[in-house]
Amino acid sequence: AQRVTQPEKLLSVFKGAPVELKCNYSYSGSPELFWYVQYSRQRLQLLLRHISRESIKGFTADLNKGETSFHLKKPFAQEEDSAMYYCALGTGGGNKLTFGTGTQLKVEL
Amino acid sequence: NAGVTQTPKFQVLKTGQSMTLQCAQDMNHNSMYWYRQDPGMGLRLIYYSASEGTTDKGEVPNGYNVSRLNKREFSLRLESAAPSQTSVYFCASSGWAGGPGANVLTFGAGSRLTVL
């Protein structure tokens, strides 16, 4: 069965510091990985997906199949990055996502 | 465009009462989902509907029933509410499996349910 692990419940960094939110997955097939974000008083929304290979709001994430990881990174954290971040795994051919438990990112001034 | 609309936003129930959470989307999406969000547990899939006329169990279906009324609407029913069902419920929708929008979920605003 597929599984997504986000080891940190809370990550606190200072503004301008680098950010790395960890995500590891377990799946025997070809995975599709996503990061979803929930800002305060806003809806959960897609941040980025691995097949797009793009940078959104300065965030990037690279799928590492060898380490089964999809860590989310940003070189310089901003106050507006404070939010709950969920890593999610989609399985090939299906249309169901398995979410991790989430990491609350707090960017302090 | 409203996207995904869920009602009610808040509800308090007593143990044993029943209620239905309503969800509608106006994006012509094929797939719809119900998730629950609990502290430390993340989002867990309750039920989903890959297309109109089909429904399937997710990770935590016990105590819930669903109805895909038409392509737009997907309701979640609690027949006999229990305190363990206190949670925030999210409805979501996405394009058809295998298509470019697969797994790209659009979420509703959430429904906070408390069962006393």
Image: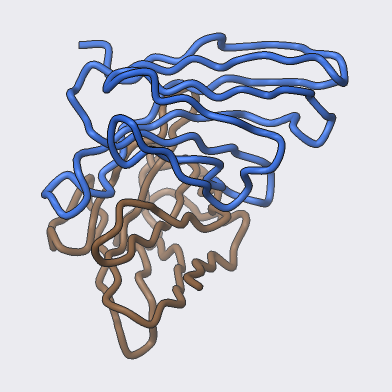
Q: Image quadrant of residue B73?
A: top left
For image coordinates 57% across by 53% down, the residue present is B59
The percent position of residue B30, horizontal first and vertical second, equals 23, 34
Number of numbered tags placed on the structure image: 0
- Chain in brown in the render: A
For image coordinates 20% across by 39% down, the residue present is B95
For image coordinates 47% across by 25% down, the residue present is B67
Q: Give whichever of A74, A49 is nearer the camera.
A: A49
Which image quarter is the C terminus of chain B in?
A: top right
Which image quarter is the N terminus of chain B in?
A: top left
Q: Give whichever of A107, B21 is nearer the camera.
A: B21
- Chain in blue in the render: B
The percent position of residue A57, horizontal first and vertical second, equals 23, 45
Q: Residue furthest bottom?
A: A66
Give the vertical position of A90 relative to A39 (above or below): below
For image coordinates 45% across by 28% down, the residue present is B91
Give the vertical position of B23 relative to B102 (above or below): above
The percent position of residue A92, horizontal first and vertical second, equals 26, 67
Q: Residue furthest front?
A: B53
Give the vertical position of A68 relative to A98 (above or below): below
In the picture, measured across the screen, residue B74 lies left or right of residue A6, that is left
Question: What colour scheme has been applied to the protein in the rendered image?
Answer: by chain
Give the vertical position of B66 relative to A19 (above or below): above
